[in-house]
Image: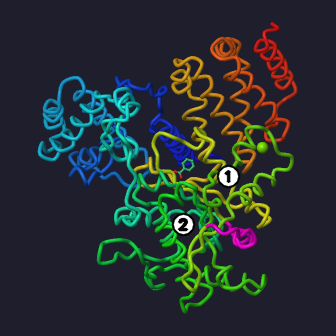
Amino acid sequence: MTTSADRDRRVLEIHERLVEIEQRLIPTGLHVFGRPSIGKERADLLRMIVSFDRPEAGTRALPRLIAEALGLELGSDSPSSEEDLQERERVAAIVDNAIRTFLKHDAETAIAELKTAINLDADEARPIFALLTEVSRQLETNNEIESLLRGLRGEFIEPGPGADIVQNPAILPTGRNTHAINPYSVPSELAFSRARVVADRLLERYQTEHGRFPRAMALVLWGLDNIKTQGEGVAQALWLLGVRPVRDALNRVTQVTAIPLAELQRPRIDVVMTVSGIFRDLFSPTVELLDRAVRLVAQLDEPPELNYVQRNIQEQMLSEQMDFDEAALRVFSNAPGNYGTNVNFMVMDSQWQSDHTLGDLFVTRKCFAYGRDSRGRQIQGREARLAMDRALTRVEATYQNIDTFEIGITAVDHYFEYLGGVSKAVEKRAQVRPAIYLSDSLAREATIRTLSETVQLETRAKTLNPKWYEGMLQHGFRGVAEIENHVSNTFGWSATADAVDDWVYTEVARTFLLDYEMLERLRTLNPHSAHSLVNRLLEASGRGYWEADDETLQRLQEIAGELEDYVEGVA
Ligand code: BEZ
Ligand code: MG
């Protein structure tokens, strides 16, 4: 029997899921080159910007200030009672109101309103609205077309940092020449302290689900992400290994030091790092730092049950008769001058028979080791397939740090080519599918989700969300292509990790193809993408990723035939 307490708890859970979807920044259409952001889009951006503490701008999160003024205590991310939930909604409504007043009138009016309504100290609110005024002004400025023309004329374009607006409002105005960062500054102290929280939650999540720590993990590190976060991904790897970056006299991170086990309070986790070609090129000192960290940890005098790096390397040396230098390789990338895994191309072109082909392709492309051997000689992309194979054999969890507010795991094919690719490679080598996790910096306090949870959230927040797809459809031809892209990238997660539930494909079919009016719209705007979309669903069924009923499949076959005729000009 369901008690009323049970019922309340379930309602709270459902509510929490809905809020999670609602709170994601859902792009309501594509960015149009040269066009400033307006209306609701701007309000959404501003609301996201004020929801974080920004020590660099001297501001605190507006929801936090409002809660304090109301004498409320907003705890962790998930509400624990109905009362808690109502308090959160009250705070959110006040934030929305303040932003609306700010956009309609000005900062002082919004500050005065907050003072009158909830007695929020004007001196506390002022820096936040000063930041909003600046951001808002810069959002109105758009130099993209002018800068493009300057670039084409070979003229100077002012440089600017790269990130997304919520992460770092200093990227505005757009249309500047995005610069990288000094690799010796990575990871920054802020990145390291944020990484500790995320990596601890990652281990906590694994422990909750498996009752122990993973023997080894595989991490994906990208260049642009580590530029944007000053090396948060790098710092997570270091923290898992249980080391701290050390700065030299010139303030460059060139060394690491082991955090004592007594302080770490857990085993050192073995990490296999696959870094992108861009990371390898931009962060060559960091690649060496990561390799150095592994070698340092491997040689500490510690009990093997608290030092998985050492235990795994010893095992590898014994069972494979590998020498230490070979068994300690943990940083892998493409061959010098090469980029990408090609797993995405293979999936998009339906060019694989057995799904292990995808994981094998990943290793073929990414088995080039980087670092330095015990004698100090550089290892610069030496093919080390066996070492990578063996290291992946022990991996029990794979992970990628997601730090963007704009691009999700079904928006581009790179997430599944990397995280999906490495997971598939592990599945064959370890003979079991690893636990696959992603972090989410969108949550005020970093959240760890499993891959399936993330796919579900992306599907609800974007692909199947009328607000999202109607926004896309406003862009006509390109919008239909975007919808098709999201579905194909979702399919990529079936191919590499079987992480997509049947209902996702069922609902995609129902929303875009079995609805006659919608099908007509897609066909008129972009019959090619509509055709690809239906074929992708049929492929999902054909490959066993989707159990659809016969009637649905038959209808989809008919639609595929009709679209093909239409595209070929027969009908
Ligand atoms: C990178 O920044 O490393 C990256 C960007 C796009 C795709 C893959 C990797
Ligand atoms: Mg299935």
Disc 1 marks a residue whose amino acid type is Thr
- Asked whether mark 2 lies closer than 8 Å to ligand 1, one says no
Give the Cα separation between the discs numbered 1 and 2: 30 Å
Residue 388 in the magenta stretch? The answer is yes
Determine whether, in the image, residue 357 is placed left or right of residue 137.
Answer: right
Q: In the rendered image of this protein, does residue 279 appear above or below residue 478?
A: below
**Front residue of this view, candidates 248 and 14:** 248
Q: Earlier in the sequence, mark 1 or mark 2?
A: 2
Q: Where residue 428 appears, x then y in whole percent? A: 79, 62
Disc 2 marks a residue whose amino acid type is Glu
Secondary structure beneath dot 2 equals helix
Give the residues in magenta: 381-396
Residue under pointer 2: 204
Determine whether, in the image, residue 429 is placed left or right of residue 99.
Answer: right
Q: Which residue is located at x 45 percent, y 55 percent?
A: 446
Residue under pointer 1: 341
Ligand 2 is located in which of the four quadrants? top right
